[in-house]
Image (spheres, rainbow, N blue to C red):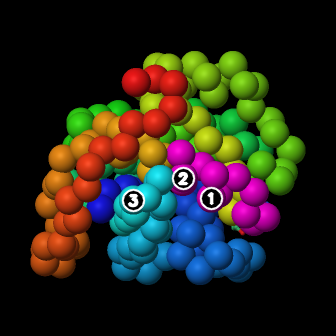
Amino acid sequence: MFKAVLLGEAGVGKSSIFLRLKENVFGERLQPTVGIESCSKVVRIDNQTITLSIWDTAGVERFKTITRNYYRNTHAVFLVFSCDNPSSLHYLSQWADDCSRHAPKALKFLIGNKTDLERLIPVENIDNFAAGFECEDTYFMSAKTGAGVDESFQRIGERLMDVFNTPLIVESHYNESIEITKFQPSRSGCCQ
Ligand code: GDP
Ligand code: MG
């Protein structure tokens, strides 16, 4: 199991991505999240199964009060911006700094959401951000249509398997420990 947290400005679609992963639906009038929520996304890689435990911010990003607890034992952070909103990429630098401080070992994945809308951010700016903040990769998706969601999380799961190949204990927000499945690393692709 890998713990992953969603980060980014309010309105970029974090909770919509979360809901798409959790229930495969899109709620146009999604209420701001109340209370920290996590859901599981199972990814199959070859003959193995991994679970991504994905956490949403509970809307507290509005008040810049993400706590250190949110980052605890995090393997991956999803830095989400909205493709139709250049300032959402700009502000993401604060979140990237925040997670470098609180979760220095976590892998950063850049996610451009709302690809169903007009893309208003030059590709060059996105690439520069990814390089500047040492993001593993950039993924594009639409929580609304579902386009790109499964493919992206499949590739993210594969990347996590490649990098973290030892069993790790993940704590939930209630501090009970979650059983960890020991698995063999699977190295596929061209970068071995
Ligand atoms: P959060 O504040 O980052 O959790 O963002 P929400 O998930 O609450 O979404 C903010 C707004 O963007 C809502 O009105 C959503 O319906 C809308 N939204 C989220 N994802 C998409 C998407 O992929 N495409 C479009 N067109 N709208 C989206
Ligand atoms: Mg939200």
> Of label 2 and label 3, which has the lower sequence position?
3
Q: Position of residue 49 (x, y in %)?
A: 40, 63
* CB under 8 Å between discs 1 and 2: yes
Q: What's the residue at 63%, 28% (across, down)?
A: 126
Q: What's the residue at 73%, 63% (across, down)?
A: 146
Q: Is residue 149 above or below residue 166?
A: below
Q: Which residues are magenta?
A: 144-155
Task: Tell me the SS state at disc 3.
Answer: strand
> CA separation, marks 1 and 2?
6 Å
Q: Position of residue 62 (x, y in %)?
A: 47, 60
> Image quadrant of residue 123?
top right
Identify the residue at the far right of this view.
Answer: 118
In this view, the residue in front, 101 or 50, is: 50
Q: Position of residue 24 (x, y in %)?
A: 65, 76
Q: What's the residue at 59%, 64% (across, down)?
A: 17
Task: Tell me the SS state at disc 2.
Answer: helix
Q: Nearer the viewer, mark 2 or mark 3?
A: 3
Mark 1, ligand 1, within 8 Å: the answer is: no
Mark 3, ligand 1, within 8 Å: the answer is: no
In this view, the residue in front, 192 or 151, is: 192
Residue type, label 3: Gln
Residue 91: image tag = none
* CB under 8 Å between discs 2 and 3: no
Point out the image quarter for the C terminus.
top left
Q: Position of residue 2 (x, y in %)?
A: 31, 57
> Label 1: which residue?
150
10 Å crowding of disc 3: few (<14), some (14-19), many (20+): few
> Label 3: which residue?
48
10 Å crowding of disc 2: few (<14), some (14-19), many (20+): some
Q: Is residue 147 above or below residue 120?
A: below
Q: Judge left or right: residue 114 versus residue 166.
A: right
